[in-house]
Amino acid sequence: MSLGPRQRPLLGVAVALVGPAALTAATRPIADTLTLAGVTLLYLVPVVAAAVVGGVRPALLAAVGAALLVNFYFLTPYHSLDVDSPAGVVVPAFQVERIPAPLSPPGAATSTTAP
């Protein structure tokens, strides 16, 4: 079963919503053993998965959601979106900047002409 052009973005949005939430639920019990860099790298997985499945827009949704979840659950002050250190701004910005370039859906025509 292959996904059509309308289903891929919808699946990408589902990955963007469920991936970071599931990762948060899985990492909360071990949050004290993780560094900020480690947490941020873990949250890149659902961002890249959303990009591969659905493209740039779902990836951007995943990146913004992941940045908010990292800020809320893993940065001091906990359970707040306040930022008390420069790392709290730099790391989520790095995450959004690393969204992969637009990916062509499978079977899309690509231009091979040279300028």
Image (cartoon, rainbow, N blue to C red):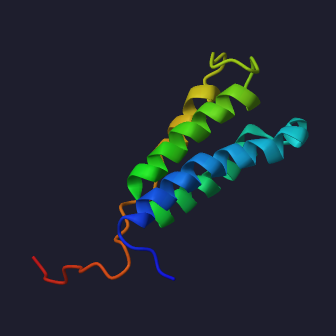
Horizontal relation, residue 112 to residue 106: left or right: left
Using the rendered image of the protein, determine whether residue 56 is visible from the camera's viewpoint.
yes
Q: With respect to residue 68, does 34 lie above or below? A: below
Using the rendered image of the protein, determine whether residue 33 is visible from the camera's viewpoint.
no
Image point (74%, 20%), residue name = 79
Q: Quadrant of residue 7?
A: bottom left
Horizontal relation, residue 25 to residue 37: left or right: right
| x and y, in percent, of residue 38 in the image | 74, 47
Horizontal relation, residue 36 to residue 7: left or right: right
Image point (63%, 29%), residue name = 87
Horizontal relation, residue 87 to residue 106: left or right: right
Depth check: give the residue in front, 9 or 43. 9
Q: Quadrant of residue 92?
A: top right
Locate the C terminus by quadrant. Answer: bottom left
Image point (56%, 38%), residue name = 65
| x and y, in percent, of residue 81 in the image | 63, 19
Depth check: give the residue in front, 42 or 115. 42
